[in-house]
Amino acid sequence: MSTHSLPRLPAPIRSYLNDPSLTALWAAARKRLERNRLAPTGTVQAQLDAEGANRLGGLLGTRLEPGLRRIQLGSLDAALRASAAQCGLVSVVADLTGHPLQDRMSAKEAQQTAWTALWQQLDADLTEAGLAHAGWIGDWLRELRSGILTRAGIEAATTALGSAVRTIKTLTNTPLHPPDGTGAEAVKQWELSELAAHTTGDAHGLDEGRLTSLLVLKAIAAACTLPSPDSAASRRLLWERVGVSTDTLSGTVMVWRLAPPGPHPWAQMMRTRRDLALVTHLTLQELRTVPDVTLTEPGTTVYICENPQVLQAAARYGLPSVLVCVSGNPSAAGWELLQRLIASGANVAYHGDFDWPGVAIAERVIRLGARPWRMYSTDYLDALAALPADRLTPLTGTPAPSPWDPQLEAMMAQRGLAVHEEALLADLLGDLRAPSNG
């Protein structure tokens, strides 16, 4: 309701009531009315000087002494209606204080109803998306209820949550299609702007600082049992964990002795770098610039490691095998390269850490079409037996399945110890010294 629709007090009575001696009374009345559903009931207290007591007494038809006075709002409302004002207390207070009163109790109830509806809609959306029973949902919801949404406001929260659920559903339920009929599954890779346009209708909907982006990243962190991201770098790494590239240049994958065949200038350049014994950092932009170049001859064994120290040692000793380092969870460039290698018919062999995050990464890479490389329960037990006690660390986090060797998960859970890739460096380098095809 605008101030122009309010009754205007006649000038004489307005001048009488608007005297500074009554300002405190109208402020107190306004506060009480807004808490009282705009009903003129109950009392207010106001400090009145002689002028204020005289004017209010004249309105009420009684004699008032100066000082702290308790005034019945019902009596004040009746007196105003009977006076030259010809309207009740709510209209008078609105006129004298300059803007309409708000029924704060009703507004609060409406706000509470709206938030209840939002949480109910979120539950329905999560159920429809097939996410309601995900193990991380409870942690995510608890963080959302901690205040991030209420600070944004109901309208912004409703829009952002709907977009966030669509984005999470897209990331978790993207169909996996065999890229070349071989049965190897392709992991869908997204550009951040592409994903945002697909799920929010706005190519900038998942940009840094957007509420939807923050909600999705908190969901990814909860699903990966990681802390909420607190820096641009940690946010970029979280996007990369689910195959989303925030740009095509920052995330790289390191390769040693990758030598694509054929006359393409890029392939020739990669062979020159092999001959110069140089490690190459490949970006997503570079790989997508040469989509039709075959990366290896069919049947070539390409080893994949998780830790850069393995590739560094292979380069130091000039070992002859082709080696790729994904540096933990593969970046978008890493996934692109892995898919291309498998599609080209390479014999891709993967090794990573014997900890729960390492097993989870291995499961994704092996599901893509790679084979395990010293990633069996026997390799784990042999490593435990060979390592001194001071080099063993306890397993932490959520157990991850190892479908290529279910006994591995069972043995790791039973022993409760992690073995990092560097601990098997001698064995891995021994394999890299004797390259094989097929």
Image (cartoon, rainbow, N blue to C red):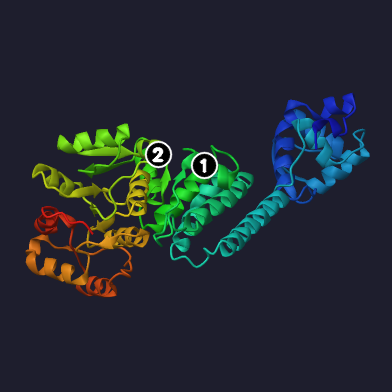
| Whether residue 67 is visible | no
Q: Are marks 1 and 2 in contact (CB under 8 Å)?
A: no
Mark seen at residue 288 = 2
- Residue drawn at point x = 80 percent, y = 48 percent: 40
Q: Quadrant of residue 29?
A: top right
Q: Which mark is in front, 1 or 2?
A: 2
Mark found first going from the N terminus, 1 or 2? 1
Q: Position of residue 396 (x, y in %)?
A: 26, 63
| Disc 1 packing (10 Å; few <14; some 14–19; many ≥20) | some
Please give the residue where the numbered disc 1 appears in the rendered image: 194
The span from disc 1 to disc 2 (Cα, nearest Å) is 15 Å
Q: Position of residue 197 (x, y in %)?
A: 56, 42
Q: Is residue 237 above or below residue 427?
A: above
Q: Is residue 147 above or below residue 5?
A: below
- Residue drawn at point x = 20 percent, y = 35 percent: 273
Q: Position of residue 212 (x, y in %)?
A: 53, 45
